[in-house]
Image (spheres, helix red, strand yellow):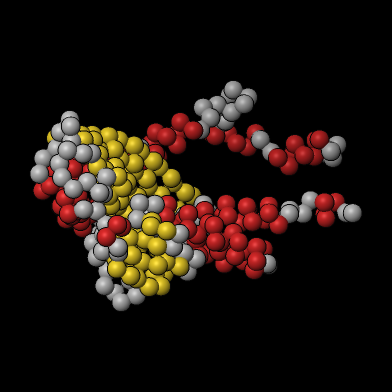
Amino acid sequence: MSDEEETQPTDDQKIEIAKWFLLNAPAGEIQYIAKDMKAVLQDETLYTTAAAVAFPLYNKSHMICLDFPDRSGEVMVTPFSEISENEYLDPRTAQVAVVDHVNQVCRRARPANDEELPTPYIEEYRYALDIEVTKYVSEAYPKGICSVYCVNGKDVEEPGLDFELVVVISAARLSPQNFCNGSWRSIWNVEFKDEAQFVEVRGTLQVGAHYFEEGNVQLDAKHECKDSTMLMSPEDCAHSVTTIIRHHETEYLNSLQTSYSKLPDATFKDLRRKLPVTRTLFPWHNTMQFSLRRDIQKSLGLEK
């Protein structure tokens, strides 16, 4: 057996490698990666196996948005809207979308069952928060989308028990023709604690960017924060929670802008070596004393 045959990866290893590349594709670029994976693998079975696992995970982590076939609304593909392997709830229209993950399209929709929806009491809070967050997202993110889901306590019918809502916000700016893509994703867990009359808000913010003109530069920044407010009426709670979200997201965006504005004058200079390994400054005023050609001739004994 030749060395080349011995070092060939197994089919399982090829699948794992393909999954890794697909899962780590920047925002909006997984279909390009998939096309390349097909060409590299040259095996439809291996590609299909890898794609069947990677695409659902990628779609949920990037919280992609798909139109219903009849254009009656949109559904966000997230871990919080997932009902079954290929079914995702849109609480605004009370519809469940059947999603084709690999092609990233909604194939059909059906009305949501009563057990898949929160009670009228919880829906009051969910709906009020959805209204306020939608207003905020339309102002802050020109191409942003959002949704609000009940992830705990959707069967609560009256005050006295705790429940939890999740706000998801996703925005992407894709410009592959200009060699750059970027995305914003934020997840806000909102826990309503009835006994303490207290609402705890925990946020995870993630920013991704990819610039690939004559190179490959990527940004993947993540930030976590928490805050709280008092438990009030649905409308007052919605306003207060949205104010908290607005404050923390604006603060984080400003901190990113400040950090990157200092890159040329501070960070990049700090990355440079103060002195070369010889511990002496390079004599830029008299570079003629150095000659690569002369050094090579000397080392080869070719000097005249």
Query: Horizontal and vertical percent for residue 142?
Result: 25, 59
Q: Which of 223 and 118 lies nearest the eye of the viewer?
A: 118
Q: Which of 209 and 17 lies nearest the eye of the viewer?
A: 17
Which residue sits at x=54%, y=57%?
A: 53
Image quarter of the C terminus: top right
Q: Is residue 290 visible?
A: yes
Find the residue positioned furthest to the bottom: 70
Which residue sits at x=10%, y=48%?
A: 235
Total marks shown come to: 0
Find the residue positioned furthest to the top: 279
Q: Is residue 89 left or right of residue 231?
A: right
Q: Is residue 167 visible?
A: no
- Specify the quadrant of the image occupied by residue 77: bottom left
Q: Is residue 168 left or right of residue 159?
A: right
Image quarter of the N terminus: bottom right
Query: Horizontal and vertical percent for residue 229?
Result: 16, 35
Which residue sits at x=58%, y=55%?
A: 19
Q: Which of 300 and 133 lies nearest the eye of the viewer?
A: 133
Query: Horizontal and vertical percent for residue 52?
Result: 54, 61
Q: Which of 245 and 50 lies nearest the eye of the viewer?
A: 50
Query: Horizontal and vertical percent for residue 137?
Result: 22, 54
Seen in the picture, residue 91 relative to 198 is either above or below; the reply is below
Q: Is residue 132 left or right of residue 4?
A: left
- Specify the quadrant of the image occupied by residue 112: bottom left
Find the residue positioned furthest to the right: 1
Which residue sits at x=75%, y=36%?
A: 295
Q: Is residue 164 left or right of residue 292?
A: left
